[in-house]
Image: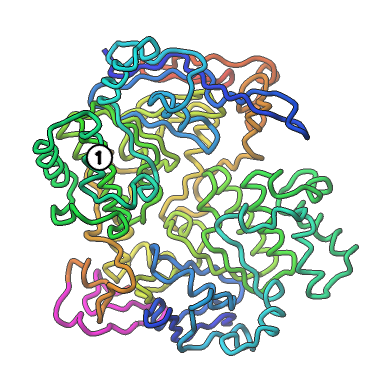
Amino acid sequence: MTLLAIQDLSVRAGDLSLVDGVTLDVGAGEVVALVGESGSGKSLTALSVMGLLGDGLTIESGSITLGEANLSGASASVMSELRGNEIAMIFQEPVSSLNPLVPVGAQVAESLIVHGRATAEEAKAQAIDMLRQVGIPEPESRARQLPAELSGGMCQRVMIAAAFISKPRLLIADEPTTALDVTIQAQILELMSALTTETGTAILLITHDMGVVAELADRVCVMYGGCVVEQGPVDTIFAKPRHPYTRMLLNTLPRLDEEPKGELFAIPGNVPSPQDWPSGCRFQTRCDRPTAACFERPELQGDAHRFACFHPTGVAS
Amino acid sequence: MSLLSVHDLKVHFPVRTGKFGDGKSVVKAVDGVDLTIDVNETLAVVGESGCGKSTTGNAILGLAPVTGGKIFFEGRDLSGLSKAERKHVWREMQVVFQDPVSALNPRRTIAQSIAEPLVIHNFPPAEIAARVDELMTLVGLNRDQRDRRPGALSGGQRQRVVIARALALNPKLIICDEPVSALDVSIQSQILNLLIRLQDELGLSYLFIAHDLSVVRHIADRVVIMYLGVVVEQGPTAEVFANPVHPYTEALISAIPLPDPSLRGKRKRIVLKGDLPSPLNPPVGCPFVTRCQLAESQCETDRPPLEPITETRMKRCFVRQH
């Protein structure tokens, strides 16, 4: 069952197109990874879902629905009713995303109180319970502490507790472990995976780390230059990528089982900024197989495994 | 003779503690580190934030105060040098930092930034211009970018500028502090390839400070694992990755997310409990005791020494022998 459906979403800043015709859906309880490099439009896609696009950014066209609710045309009051209730979001920098002047327990309890789902007393008890569930030792005393008194990993647990306390149907996690050390990253990934199994929350996971994708995602959606270039089940994307960008991206990763100090595969050129995006296929300037056909915009083709390329690599999966 | 050798390096920072800042305490950021780097070798220093890996690099560069221990570069003790002698040694030792945006002056052109070390060391202007051209070609920059400013370049190109500047004085050692972690994935491999090629061509040595273990596995000949200011394990990279001895190294390697979904649920993963202890109040015995699954009573009270496992490998653990 489809929970979140994004249809043909385009976002622009003035004349500049930043997200261009993104179509993507997330099923109930599913973990979908949105992968791409800086400027690919992955975070803007997520912020559009949350209704949190910054000043000067507008949704030009497209629709976003969550279950029955239409998010793209929703008023501010409808959006704030959904946020922290049906949809929650966690960000990359836990320390700067928490209010430094409010004890963490109150920040976890906030969404319950704001949405009138519990009294202050009940919310406090639930918040402490949630902090315990995310693995914070001595949650009663920790709940009274300020974010600055906690480590980065602890703050990320607090963010996760605040996101999960309302048992949202959809969690958007924007680079949730990028700022954390590997051993803490392992803890957080394990925690997120356990919580989704328990609550049935779906996750839209935004990341550039293919290792994290392989650990957590059911499906993968690869973005380049504001467009979706490929999407499909995680095993298929890693084993049989069809879009040249996906294949090259996977090939650039240093692997633990290869000869050290060999030449790593490198994608030529640089990640272009939006004003330099070519018309037609956005990847043509860095691709190893462009032809005249690529001056046209390729459409996503396929069914469960979709890709937007005139000259796909590999064999059909 | 090794190019660089560090003996029992200590960097301690005094800090004020307590509600009114009236207490005094000491953060032992680096507390007795030994390491050596040979000519044309890459040594990686690995560990999580707060383990002292960057402070170790800074102390070698003279950017952090050395509280104790000795640093030898080509056999010369750096602590006993006069200012002029130090300036000479610094020509041989350069640095590449993580963030190329903040490492470059936004108002200078690329050529001016690359030329800066040459200007400081009083090279004649004609020679500087020729050398800048040569360096730009060496790191794969286009010469018509000379007069651009950093803002007009991409992240990968900026890091190439920083590397060109570090190479200007023909150094023997480059300290690379997280040189690729701020770059996009598709650009990381370009810069790693460049570093490997430059090492081959110029016979450079690298002290490579990083937290990304798959990058370290690729580029380093030897690796030093640090935890809470001390070295817990060291040895040839391939051997340490294949057969980690210290429980922390083992956990670290098992926690690397591998880009292969078919391994999900099949890998033996050690998820450590809790966080790094506060460096203000480190454990008395083994620094890793609070998170170790193998800890015994001796680990609580005594600090294990760094002892050899084989001729090339060392570990700091009472429990694990090999």
> Badge 1 local density, few (<14 within 10 Å), some, or many (20+)?
many
Q: Is residue A6 above or below residue B312?
A: below
Residue A96 among magenta residues: no
In the shown orientation, is residue B86 left or right of residue B265? left
Numbered circles on residues, count: 1
Q: Which residues make up the magenta segment?
A: A290-316
> Split into 4 quadrants, where in the image is the N terminus of chain A?
bottom right
Q: Is residue B220 above or below residue A111?
A: above
The residue closer to the viewer here, B69 or A203, is B69
B243 relative to A174 in the view: left or right: left
Q: Is residue B238 visible?
A: no
- Provide the major secondary structure of the magenta segment: loop
Residue at (28, 20) in percent of width and height = B89
Instruction: From the viewer's perspective, tell me whether residue A47 is left or right of residue B164.
Output: right
Residue B193: image quadrant is: top left
**Type of amino acid under label 1:** Arg
- Identify the chain of the residue marked 1, using the numbered disc in the image: B
Residue for badge 1 = B165
Place of residue A57 in the rendered image (x, y in percent of width and height, measured from the top left): 48, 78
For label 1, the SS is helix
Residue A83 pos. (x, y %): 67, 75
Using the rendered view, name the quadrant where residue A127 is placed: bottom right
Q: Which residue sits at x=14%, y=77%?
A: A291
Q: Position of residue A192 (x, y in %)?
A: 62, 58
A307 inside magenta stretch: yes
* Quarter of the image where the C terminus of chain A is located: bottom left
